[in-house]
Image: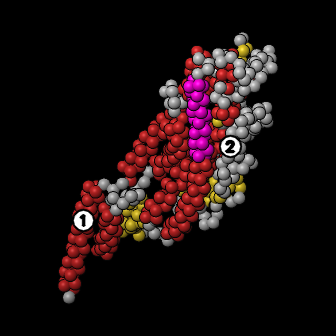
């Protein structure tokens, strides 16, 4: 190797070492910066006519496992969607009451039955009659409370959807701007590591909002695709999501029933966003979970009201004293939201003795309740016919001896008639109420358990990604020592060449 070639190699080496030291310095300076990924210097051999002339430094790149990052983004969507569902059901858990502890619907209905059992021994007891009314009010109030919580959770989900759409648009716009900057930098041969770190913040935010897979292009461009096939373009102005506000009444639904769609560039993509991410979780809460609970509550309220009414005591009604008629299409169309309105019959509140005497005549039928005539005004104070009917039949599994109760509707529920209730084919209203409470508790517990499991996976993925991409101060200092030694070696080469040139010139002179 000639002196010129040796000098070129040494000078190039010093230049490369300076760039490497700058990368090490940046890594050390940003060791505690959130989202910073360790950068590495890239070098390649330089040769002229087959003769080695040292190395040339290229743009610094990130030490990042792209597949691990993709797995983490996917897990972010899973956890975020489950977390939304868990929080929504947690708000229902607080008012639903735990099964078997007496404060749930089945337990409160049991106290109504206890009141009638006590009244059977003393039908003319005013305190006993008042106890029944109080227990009935507690039961109706519990239905009101749960139904109100369900409505609030649904409204909160709708509000969160609007917020999520706004956040999604903002994140897409930011990532789009950063992507343009990255593409320009790559084209100019400039390191894009810092810009990519900044863009990852936006990608992480998007992954928490929707379930998306990010496809990185060699030129720095990026695309996003959802599992349903929805493609998101990050070019400025290319993608825009939108939705509207709405009141979440029991009778409204999606699609076409008053619940607004989520659109992308004017096209309804609601179903394609359902699933993962907070947006998908909120869609599920708004359109499936809470409407399902509301349908179950309405069916309990309607069934309890009609079974009491069938035996001659209209105990539970709407505020105007009427029981909603059934037989609509869809099934619950005539009593949607009844659980929020159910109350103790105003006539019974005015005349508590009606819980002993009855409120109406029953003609009787072979498949329904037997005939019944209320205790007339001034009738026997020890009248027990109605009390017995309530205990044995209104609160029992049979409508009369040997004839099973008409089962509650288990299919075709909700405003669209597409929801399924958790009830069995038969049984008492207490069994029905217990099934509803147990179903909600089981769903909440299942989602809570899944959330915990998926969060553990998320934490593990984050730890693995961080371990491979974070800055290790000891390793960086070790690299710095190696670079310093290399710097010294190249400097000595230059010094030796300088001495040789000086000696050569002196000899010539």
- Residue 325: x and y in percent read 77, 33
Disc number at residue 484?
Answer: 1
Q: Is residue 492 above or below residue 158?
A: below
Q: Position of residue 372 (x, y in %)?
A: 75, 18
Camera-side residue of 12 and 368: 368
Give me the residue at 68% from left, 43% from top. 250
Q: Quadrant of residue 92?
A: top right
Name the residue carrying label 2. Answer: 250
> Residue shown at 66%/39% (left/top)?
341
Please tell me how crowded label 2 is: few (under 14), some (14-19), or many (20+) other residues with Cα within 10 Å: many
Q: Residue at x 66, y 22 (%)?
A: 356
Secondary structure under tag 2 reads loop
Q: Which residues are magenta?
A: 126-154
Residue at left offset 72%, top offset 39%: 320
Cα distance in 3D space between marks 2 and 1 = 72 Å
Circle on res. 191: none
Vertical position of residue 155 compared to residue 175: above or below: above
- Report the front residue among 475 and 406: 406
Residue 151: say if magenta.
yes
Quadrant location of the N terminus in the rendered image: bottom left
Q: Position of residue 44 (x, y in %)?
A: 40, 63
């Amino acid at each position: 190797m000639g002196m010129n070639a040796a000098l070129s190699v040494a000078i190039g080496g010093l230049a490369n070492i300076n760039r490497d030291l700058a990368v090490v310095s940046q890594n050390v300076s940003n060791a505690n910066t959130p989202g910073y990924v360790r950068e590495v210097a890239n070098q390649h051999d330089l040769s002229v006519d087959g003769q080695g002339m040292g190395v040339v430094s290229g743009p610094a790149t990130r030490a990042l496992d792209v597949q691990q990052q993709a797995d983490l983004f996917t897990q972010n969507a899973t956890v975020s969607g489950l977390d939304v569902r868990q929080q929504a059901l947690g708000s229902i858990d607080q008012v639903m009451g735990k099964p078997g502890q007496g404060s749930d619907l089945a337990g409160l209905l049991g106290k109504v039955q206890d009141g009638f059992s006590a009244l059977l021994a003393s039908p003319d007891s005013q305190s006993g009659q008042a106890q029944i009314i109080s227990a009935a009010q507690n039961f109706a109030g519990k239905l009101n409370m749960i139904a109100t919580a369900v409505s609030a959770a649904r409204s909160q989900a709708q509000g969160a959807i609007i917020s999520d759409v706004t956040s999604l648009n903002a994140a897409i716009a930011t990532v789009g701007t950063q992507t343009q900057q990255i593409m320009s930098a790559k084209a100019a041969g400039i390191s894009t590591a810092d810009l990519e770190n900044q863009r990852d913040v936006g990608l992480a935010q998007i992954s928490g909002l929707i379930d998306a897979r990010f496809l990185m292009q060699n030129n720095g461009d990026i695309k996003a695709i959802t599992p349903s096939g929805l493609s998101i373009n990050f070019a400025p102005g290319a993608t825009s999501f939108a939705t509207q506000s709405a009141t979440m009444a029991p009778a409204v639904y999606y699609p076409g029933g008053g619940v607004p769609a989520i659109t992308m560039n004017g096209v309804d993509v609601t179903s394609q966003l359902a699933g993962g991410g907070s947006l998908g979780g909120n869609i599920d809460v708004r359109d499936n979970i809470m409407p399902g609970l509301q349908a179950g509550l309405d069916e309990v309220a309607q069934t309890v009201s009609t079974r009491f009414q069938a035996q001659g005591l209209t105990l539970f009604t709407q505020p105007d004293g009427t029981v909603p008629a059934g037989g609509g299409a869809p099934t619950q169309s005539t009593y949607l939201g009844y659980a929020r309105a159910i109350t103790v019959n105003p006539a019974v509140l005015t005349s508590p003795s009606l819980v002993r005497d009855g409120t109406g005549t029953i003609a009787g039928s072979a498949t329904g309740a037997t005939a019944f005539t209320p205790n007339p005004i001034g009738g026997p104070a020890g009248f027990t016919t109605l009390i017995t009917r309530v205990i044995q039949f209104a609160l029992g599994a049979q409508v009369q001896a040997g004839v099973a109760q008409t089962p509650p509707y288990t299919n075709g529920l909700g405003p669209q008639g597409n929801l399924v209730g958790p009830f069995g084919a038969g049984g008492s209203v207490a069994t029905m109420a217990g099934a509803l409470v147990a179903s909600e508790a089981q769903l909440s517990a299942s989602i809570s358990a899944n959330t915990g499991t998926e969060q553990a996976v998320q934490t593990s993925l984050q730890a693995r990604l961080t371990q491979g991409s974070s800055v290790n101060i000891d390793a960086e200092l070790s690299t710095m020592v190696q670079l310093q030694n290399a710097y010294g070696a190249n400097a000595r080469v230059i010094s030796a060449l300088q001495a040789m040139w000086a000696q050569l010139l002196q000899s010539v002179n």
